[in-house]
């Protein structure tokens, strides 16, 4: 009898060891899980800031990690509100996790600078921008350019014609017909290189040629106010909108009316609010933080946020200027 009991204990220990191994062993896919909504008051320091007694601007993060083997076998073990995505969506072919970390850190650094420029310009401050080309924000996965152009590249010429702005880039590419090749001169890190890519037809206008990339203005930016932003190890560009709102808040714009407001959205240098990922997880995190409203990019992001917001107000915006106007002119009872 004792021997039988010993066997059962041994089998139980083996089973626990196997389950533990499956739990810690990473799988091929990645998982997005709700992160935290945190106030920016102690993370953004602005020269000339005014004391604000009530009402904070919150940023929202998302936890991204590989799924475990056990989560693959038993999906109900995944955290509530999580989304599983294929490895290719996070790590395109040839990209390591270390390279992705460096990219997200660079995106965060740029979002801090762009947010500072956008907010101060909206407040009437003098911001100096020296245009340097078209910065690649994203590349569609199903276009020929996907194998030759990377996020973070700066396009400075098309077929040897210099381009300093996204509009100039679109104009030069638009001179071609869908299917034609174009030669793009890229500034990548400290080197320049030239790649040839085939154009494709625009989904909105089949007669117009595009290369399937999303771009923003690359510029040398100088702002008249010292601003320091530190989120620690958080990376990516999606905190641009809350950064800009916090800068406006401490410089005298009443964007919260004594309430707690969360926000997410990438900012372009002209103030446009660009869509971001992880809206389900970010909305859940904002709702759990009991903020009164969640400011998000208009369109699909706003639609997804409404599905998970419960009683929390969702405010869709297309630009920082619109967000600033809506928040400062709409009083809330908190």
Image (spheres, rainbow, N blue to C red):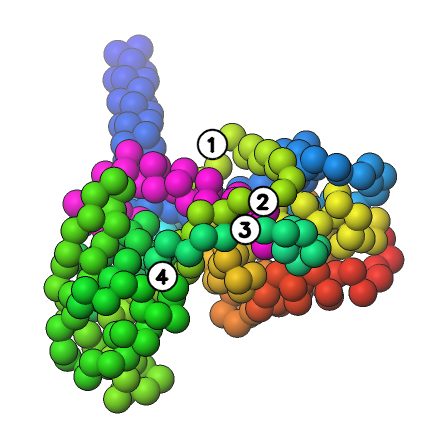
Answer with mark 1 or mark 4, whichever residue precedes in sequence. Answer: 4
Label 3–label 2 contact, CB within 8 A: yes
Residue on which the image places disc 1: 233
Mark 1 vs mark 4: give the one in front: 4
Label 2–label 4 contact, CB within 8 A: no
Answer with mark 2 or mark 4, whichever residue precedes in sequence. Answer: 4
User: Percent position (x, y) of residue 185?
Assistant: 20, 58
Answer with mark 3 or mark 2, whichever residue precedes in sequence. Answer: 3
Answer with mark 4 or mark 3, whichever residue precedes in sequence. Answer: 3
Along the horizontal axis of the image, is 109 left or right of 255?
left
Whole-Å distance between the Cαs marked 3 and 1? 29 Å
Residue on which the image places disc 2: 223
Residue on which the image places disc 3: 128
Residue extending farthest top? 2
Mark 3 vs mark 1: give the one in front: 3
Which residue is rendered at x = 19% and y = 64% of the image? Answer: 160
Magenta residues, as a range? 90-118
| Residue 332 quadrant | bottom right
Q: What element carries label 1?
A: loop
Answer with mark 2 or mark 1, whichever residue precedes in sequence. Answer: 2
Along the horizontal axis of the image, is 35 left or right of 330?
left
Residue on which the image places disc 4: 164
Q: Camera-side residue: 49 or 315?
A: 49
Q: Is residue 91 magenta?
A: yes
Whole-Å distance between the Cαs marked 4 and 3? 15 Å
Res 245 seen here: no
| Residue 307 quadrant | bottom right
Q: What element carries label 4?
A: loop
How crowded pointer 1 is (Cα within 10 Å; few <14, some 14-19, many 20+) is rated as few
Which residue is rendered at x = 73% and y = 66% of the image? Answer: 326
Whole-Å distance between the Cαs marked 2 and 4? 20 Å
């Amino acid at each position: 009898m004792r021997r039988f009991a010993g066997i059962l204990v041994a089998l139980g220990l083996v089973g626990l060891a196997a389950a533990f191994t499956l739990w810690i062993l990473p799988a091929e896919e990645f998982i997005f899980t709700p992160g935290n909504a945190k106030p920016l008051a102690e993370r953004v320091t602005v020269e000339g800031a005014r004391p604000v007694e009530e009402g904070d601007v919150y940023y929202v993060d998302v936890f991204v990690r590989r799924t475990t083997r056990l989560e693959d076998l038993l999906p109900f073990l995944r955290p509530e509100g999580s989304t599983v995505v294929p490895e290719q969506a996070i790590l395109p072919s040839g990209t390591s996790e270390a390279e992705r970390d460096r990219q997200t850190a660079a995106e965060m650094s740029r979002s801090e600078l762009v947010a500072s420029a956008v907010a101060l310009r909206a407040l009437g401050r003098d911001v100096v921008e020296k245009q340097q080309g078209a910065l690649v924000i994203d590349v569609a996965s199903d276009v020929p350019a996907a194998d030759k152009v990377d996020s973070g590249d700066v396009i400075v010429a098309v077929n040897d014609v210099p381009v300093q702005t996204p509009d100039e880039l679109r104009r030069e590419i638009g001179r071609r017909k869908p299917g034609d090749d174009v030669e793009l001169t890229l500034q990548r890190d400290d080197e320049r290189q030239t790649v040839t890519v085939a154009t494709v037809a625009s989904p909105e206008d089949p007669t117009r040629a595009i290369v399937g990339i999303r771009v923003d203005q690359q510029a040398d930016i100088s702002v008249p106010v010292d601003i320091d932003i530190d989120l620690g190890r958080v990376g990516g560009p999606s905190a641009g909108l809350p950064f800009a709102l916090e800068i406006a808040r401490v410089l005298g714009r009443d964007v919260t009316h004594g309430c707690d407001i969360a926000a997410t959205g990438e900012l372009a240098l002209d103030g446009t609010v660009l869509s971001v990922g992880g809206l389900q997880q970010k909305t859940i995190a904002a709702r759990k933080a009991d903020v009164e409203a969640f400011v998000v990019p208009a369109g699909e992001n706003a639609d997804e946020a409404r599905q998970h917001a419960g009683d929390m107000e969702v405010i869709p915006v297309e630009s920082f200027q619109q967000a600033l106007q809506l928040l400062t002119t709409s009083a809330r009872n908190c």
